[in-house]
Image: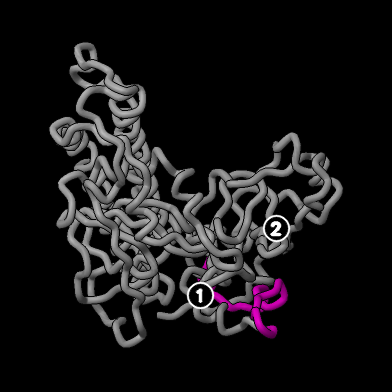
Amino acid sequence: MSYSTITIGEICEYTTSGGTPKSNVPSFYVPPTVPWLKTKEVNYSRIYETESFISEEGLKNSSAKLIPENSVIVAMYGQGDTAGRVAINKIPLTTNQACCNLIIDKAKADYQFVYYALTLMYEKLVSLKNGGAQPNLNAVLVRSVEIPYPELKTQKKIADILSAYDDLIENNQRQIRLLEEAAQRLYKEWFVDLRFPGHQTTKIVDGLPQGWTETQLESIAKFIRGKVITKNDVVEGNVPVVAGGLEPAYYHNTSFTETPVITVSGSGANAGFAKIYFQKIWASDCSYVDISSTDFIYFTYCFLKENKKSLDNLQKGAAQPHVYAKDINVLKLICPPKELIAQFEKCAKSLFGKMAQCQNTINKSRESRDRLLPKLMSGEIKV
C-alpha cells in the first residue's frame, strides 16, 4: 500500500527564512539572550541549544524571527553536504537566512512525521538547488517538495515508532557526555591540578614534579594523515568514513584503523576538533592515531580536549583552514612518568568502555531506524 502525497507548503501554517543582525552593532548581540541557529548545526537531530545568540534588540531590528518549538528546519545552503539537511527545534529560536523554517499545521500533519519524511528527501532537495558557483535551495523550492501523506493518526504512529529510536540515541549520547566529562575531570585532577596518586611525597624539581619532562606529543602518540576516499572506494560495507572529525558519512568495506581511534579534523569549519571512536573507521581528511600506535590512547585524547586552544592555534590558511598531523605531533607536552600515565589509562578504561557500549547502542539504533524509515514512509510496513 502506498500513501497519497502532498506538498510541504500545503501542510504548513507558514514558512519563513531567518536573518542575521548587523555584526557591527554590538547591542544586537549583547546581552546574548535569544538562541540563533546557523545551518551547520542543522544535521538530522533535535536541537536543544545553539552555538550562538543574539539580543532582543537584534531580533527586533533585523529580519530574524522567533521560530516556535517543534518546527522543522531545512538548511538551504552551506558548504559541503549542508544544504538539504533537516532538524527539529525543541526550543524557540531564531535562525540565519540560510534556514527555511517550516511551522507545521497541527491539524494537517505531525511535525515529527514531516521531519522523518524529509530525511528521506535529501537527494531530491539537492537536485532542486539552483544558482551559479554556489547552488542553493530557497523557500519556494522547499515548499514545492512532495512527501507521503497518510491520515494524521497514521502519521503519529509512524513518528512514534521512529522517535523511540531517537529517544534511545539521545539518552546514550547524554550518557557519553557525562562519562567523557568524568574522564576529563580525572585528567585535570591528575595532570593539571597535579593531585595525582603520590603527589604528596613527590618533589618539585625545576618547577615540575620529579620524573616529569617537557617533551612533544609524538613521544607517546604519533598522528598520521588520513587517506581521502575516492568514489571508487565507496562500496557497501560496515566501516564508516569520517571526514572533518564529525559523524560518519557513508560506508566502506575495508578497515583503515584499529579501535579505539582519535581523529582531529584536518579542514573546514571544525578544523582542530578532536573526537574518539570505538569502531573501525576510514579516516578521510583527518589526522588520526589509533590503539595500534600508542599505549596511551585515553591520556592522548584527554590531553587534546584539555588543550583545545592549542589545536585551534594550529590552523593554517585563510580561505580553508587546515590542521596537519606534523603540527599535532609537536604539541608541547609536560609528560608524566610512563608508569603514571599507565595508571591513568587503567582508571579511565572503564569510563571509555562504557562510552563504547553507549556508542554501540547508538549505532544499532540508527541502523534499525534507518531500515524502518523507508518502509514505513512507503506503506510497505503497516501501522
User: Dot 1: few (<14), some (14–19), or many (≥20) neighbours within 10 Å?
Assistant: some
Between the residue at mark 2 and the residue at mark 1, the CA separation in whole angstroms equals: 20 Å
Residue type beneath disc 2? Asn
x, y percentage for residue 328? Answer: 37, 53
Q: Which mark is residue 340?
A: none
x, y percentage for residue 67? Answer: 69, 51
Mark 1: which secondary structure? helix
For the C terminus, the quadrant is bottom left
- In the rendered view, would you say 311 is above or below 342? below
For the question of whether residue 161 can be seen, the reply is no
Specify the segment rendered in magenta. Answer: 131-151
x, y percentage for residue 80? Answer: 52, 72
Q: Dot 1 corresponds to which residue? A: 122
Q: Please give left or right for residue 246 compared with residue 237 in the image.
A: right
For the N terminus, the quadrant is bottom left
Residue type beneath disc 1? Tyr
- Sequence-first disc among 2 and 1: 2
Look at 68% across and 55% down and name the residue there.
95
- In the rendered view, would you say 326 is above or below 36? below
User: Dot 2: few (<14), some (14–19), or many (≥20) neighbours within 10 Å?
Assistant: some
Quadrant housing residue 288: bottom left
Is 143 within the magenta?
A: yes
Q: Dot 2 corresponds to which residue? A: 96
Mark 2: which secondary structure? loop
